[in-house]
Image (cartoon, grey):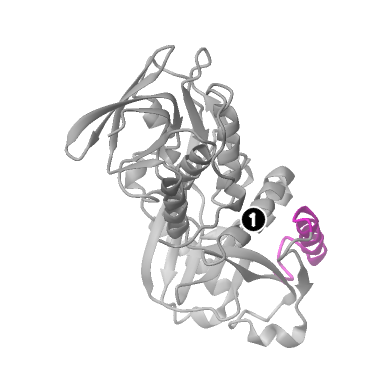
Amino acid sequence: MENRYDVVVIGGGIHGVGVAQATAAAGYSVALMEARDLAWGTSSRSSKLIHGGLRYLESGQFSVVRECLRERALLLQLAPSLVKLTPFYIPIYRDTSRRPWKIRSGLALYGVLAGFSKGAGFRKVPRSEWGGLDGLQLDGLDAVFQYWDAQTDDAALTRAVMASAKTLGADYYQSAQFLSAELDNNQAQLEFEYQQSKHRVSCQVVVNAGGPWVNHILQRVIPQTLTNAVDLVQGTHMVLDTHLQQGIYYMESPQDQRAIFAMPWQGKMLLGTTESLYKGDPAEVKPLASERDYLLETLAHYFPHYRNNMPDELSSFAGLRVLPKDDGSAFARSRETMLLWNNLDNKKVLSIYGGKLTAYRATAERVVSQLKTVLPAIKPIANVNKLALSPV
């Protein structure tokens, strides 16, 4: 086992593997430690979407949307077997809070921010086609818009990125429990449990990609480092024993006007998501009965044939978003990813707070830019913008 690296990444979610790939491509030696399996946490419990985030336009997060749409275009090129364009439908009723003019304006802006790349167009669905929209409620329906975004298998994408990182020379320690990191002016010394024994490695920089465990990891760093105040926000999805033929439906919850998606997924329906504050061990997060009721109520509101014949629940899962601590609604909070040097004096630990599946590459590029400020200049060995990704 090599015992010294330029960079050690803690956390095998999509951001951790993205950083490992980008760091290795930049020419640095890198190892990734994951306590369980790749994508065990949030990165296998998302909405499975590679999208710009149409709803973020409403809160003025234009830079987030532009970045995600740029990344969507790149992933459609680099990972065509993992990331596929899918039609989305937005039904608008007489009592829908967002009126047709507002949706049309938002979709037009979405296309502009996408640079009119593949999938940037939209249309107003003719009334003659409404009857073919998977049994969508037609009473009170004013308009339906169709646009395009992409869908993926989040866990498969995470594994593909790690496989790419390994071909570039990255080491991967699976089921490696991080125990501690001791910092001095020259290096970081990490201790971790791996294959039933304790090991030590050293590195110049630790990248903390722990997701909802980000501050838990920092508690094991000596001396104590800065942390960022965050909330963990739970999002639940359900897999139902039914299917959709036409695509993904973007629905406004009748309870609180949040966005809910009904999506085709592996021959079934994926329904999500929710937003509720979570306290406790991130490993123990579970769907709540109230969240299931909330999602099923929305489904029945838009698809009346389910009201007296709700499909069986095959499974459900809950993931955790890391959002800036705030007293306001989670729905309206910024989705900007934050990078924080946890010890400003010698810059040995860099933590990733938040982040979106779609923008994992952009986040990794930002991390590498930060790493280059403290690591020696070195010749890159690959360009991640040209590295194809395939299922493994």
- Left or right? Give the position of 294 relative to 36: right
Return the residue at label 1.
74
Magenta residues (range): 92-115
**Residue nearer the viewer, 220 or 274:** 220
Q: Is residue 365 above or below residue 347?
A: below
For this orientation, the residue located farthest to the left is 196
Residue 117 lies, in percent from the top left, at: 75, 61
**Residue nearer the viewer, 87 or 126:** 87
State yes or no: residue 89 in magenta. no
Which quarter of the rendered picture does the N terminus lie within? Answer: top left
Residue 195 lies, in percent from the top left, at: 20, 40
Q: Residue at x 56, y 81 (%)?
A: 245
**Residue nearer the viewer, 368 or 47:** 368
Residue 96 lies, in percent from the top left, at: 71, 65
**What amino acid is labelled 1 in the image?**
Leu
Residue 77 lies, in percent from the top left, at: 62, 61
Q: Is residue 20 above or below residue 315?
A: above
Answer yes or no: is residue 60 visible: no
Give residue 183's quadrant in the image. top left
Q: Residue at x 61, y 43 (%)?
A: 362
Q: Is residue 45 above or below residue 80?
A: above
